[in-house]
Amino acid sequence: MNKREAMNHIRRFGNRFDRFRNAGGAGGSGGRNASKRPKAAPNPASRKSNVFNEQVRYAWHGAVQDLKSTPLATFLTVMVIAISLTLPSVCYMVYKNVSTAASQYYPTPQITVYLEKTLDDDAAARVVGQLQAEQGVEKVNYLSRDEALGEFRNWSGFGGALDMLEENPLPAVAIVVPKIDFQSVEALNTLRDRVSHVQGVDEVRMDDSWFARLSSLTGLVGRVSAMIGVLMVAAVFLVIGN
C-alpha cells in the first residue's frame, strides 16, 4: 500500500466516523428534547375529585382515631348532634298534630244573631238574606220565634211556665257560620262587627273564649317549636366547630 492509498483509507474512515458522530448526536439531542417535553395537565374534575377523596379519607381517619382515643367524649358528641337534629323534628310534628286536632275535633266557631222582636217573617227573611250576603259567611241557619220557643221548651223543661205567658218572649235567631278562611280570631271579630251593623239585628253574641284559647295555644306551640329548632341547629354548629 502506497502513501496515496493510505491517505484515502484515512479519509474514508474519518468520513464514517463523522457520520456516526452526527447520527449519535441527533439521537441524543432528540432524546434530550423528548425528555424535556411538558407533561399533560391533569383534568380539573379529576383533581377536585382526588382532593375531595383525600379530605374525606383524612376526616374519616381523624374520626376513627378520636373514637379510639376518647370513646366516651366522641359518643357524647354524637349523641348531642343526634338529639339536636331530632328534637326540632319532634316539635314540628307536635305542632302539626295540635293544629290538625284543633281543626278536626273542635266545633266550628259560630256567631249568634238575635233579631228584633218587631220584625215579621218577611222582614226577618230579608235580614237573613243580608247576613248571607256578607263577606266570609258560609251559611246562615234561621230559627223563627216559634221555633226558638219550641227548642227552649224542650231544652229547659219549663213548658208549663211558658204556657202561662201571654206572648212569646224569645226573638228570632240567625246562626252565622263563617267560612274556613274567616275562622281566625281577627276575622271573626271583624265579621261580628259587620253583622251587628245590619238593620234589624238586635244583639250579636259570639262564644269565642275557647277558640281564642285554642288559637293562642296553637301559636305558642308553633313559636316554641321554632325557637327550639333554631337553638338546636346553633348547638349543632357549635359542637361541630369545636
Image: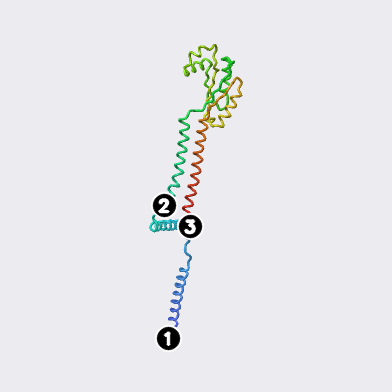
Distance from disc 3 to disc 2, alpha carbons, whole Å, reads 40 Å
In this orientation, which residue lies closer to the viewer: 95 or 52?
A: 95
SS at mark 1 in the image: helix
Distance from disc 1 to disc 2, alpha carbons, whole Å, reads 99 Å
The three-letter code of the residue at mark 1 reads: Ala
The three-letter code of the residue at mark 2 reads: Leu
Where does residue 151 sit, x and y in percent of width and height?
49, 17
Q: Quadrant of residue 194?
A: top right
In this orientation, which residue lies closer to the viewer: 146 or 99?
A: 146
Residue tagged by mark 1?
A: 6
In this orientation, which residue lies closer to the viewer: 44 or 63?
A: 63
| The label number, if any, that marks residue 169 in the structure image | none
Residue at left offset 43%, top offset 47% = 83
Residue tagged by mark 2?
A: 76
Residue tagged by mark 3?
A: 44
SS at mark 3 in the image: helix
Distance from disc 3 to disc 1, alpha carbons, whole Å, reads 67 Å
